[in-house]
Amino acid sequence: MKRGFALYTGGKDSHYAIYKALEEDILVDLLVIVKPVRSDSWMFHTVNIDLAVKHAELMGLNYLLIEVSGVKEKEVDELKRKLSRVRELSDYEVVVSGAVGSTYQKERVDVLAEELHMRHVTPLWGFPPSKLIVEEASNLSFVITAIQAYGLRMDWLGNVINASNVHAFLKDVEEASINPVGEGGEFETFVLSSPLFKRGLLYVRKAEMVTYPNFGVGYYLIRDLGTSTSS
């Protein structure tokens, strides 16, 4: 079994990529959480990013929180410099990411991995987005933490998506003509339950809703999370 680290956001795709990597005999034992200083990063997730460390705790994994500028292209170089040290001190062979269809993101991580003498593994790459989100919701539950596409109903913000309502969500997403997995930032998510969580499930104790209806934009900012051992 090959060892690797994952570029991790706490969202459904980066999480599910770790789950699917196991099917390729790849064990992720480090979460690399990238925190951009700017909120308009081209590469990296920003909403509730600090909470991704909670997933490391529930999965029993180590994590590395890396701060980058958030400036296009520069942020990737900053990440590479910081990961070079990790590579020198470890025997990691692969970098796992949750890229699905974004050539911009995949190509940059391809180059990053090559320069670190590692292999970039993308278990979700090329998966039909409408099928992927249904499969993800059949195995995980995740809350919608951002809506950033005009046309998607704002009442989905803060809702937990799982097998019971994913088809209704998908219908609205497709009617709004946006990417079914939200890979372009049309919506963002945070995972609350997963087979990978060994130490309980998460629930939101406190959150703040910030919306800009005229722009079709809203954020569900999680202020406090609780852990439950029951499903």
Image (tube, rainbow, N blue to C red):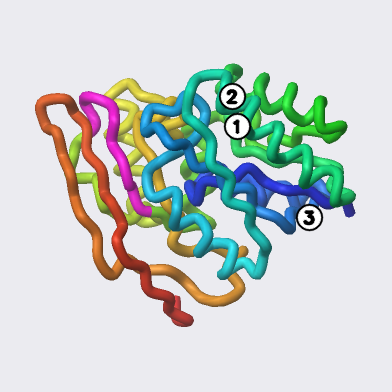
Q: Main secondary structure of the magenta part?
A: strand
Q: Are marks 1 and 2 in contact (CB under 8 Å)?
A: yes
Chain part drawn in magenta: 143-152
Identified at 62% across, 64% down, the residue is 196
Secondary structure of residue under mark 2: helix
Amino acid type, residue under disc 3 in the picture: Leu
Q: Which residue is nearer to you in this view: 199 or 30?
A: 30
Q: Which residue is nearer to you in this view: 41 or 207?
A: 41
The quadrant of the rendering that contains the N terminus is bottom right
Count residues near mark 3 (Cα–Cα under 10 Å), then give few for <14, some for 14-19, many for 20+: many
Identified at 53% across, 42% down, the residue is 67
**Drawn side of residue 25 relative to residue 157, left or right:** right
148 vs 21: above or below? above
Whether 38 is among the magenta residues is no
Point out the residue furthest to the left here: 214
12 vs 172: above or below? below
**Looking at the picture, how far across and down is residue 84, in whole percent?**
77, 38
Secondary structure of residue under mark 1: loop
Nearer the N terminus, badge 1 or badge 2?
A: 1
Query: Where is mark 3, residue-wise?
Result: 27
Query: Where is mark 1, residue-wise?
Result: 99
**Looking at the picture, how far across and down is residue 24, in whole percent?**
80, 46
Count residues near mark 1 (Cα–Cα under 10 Å), then give few for <14, some for 14-19, many for 20+: many
Q: Are marks 1 and 3 in contact (CB under 8 Å)?
A: no
Whether 150 is among the magenta residues is yes
Separation of residues labelled 1 and 2 (CA atoms): 7 Å
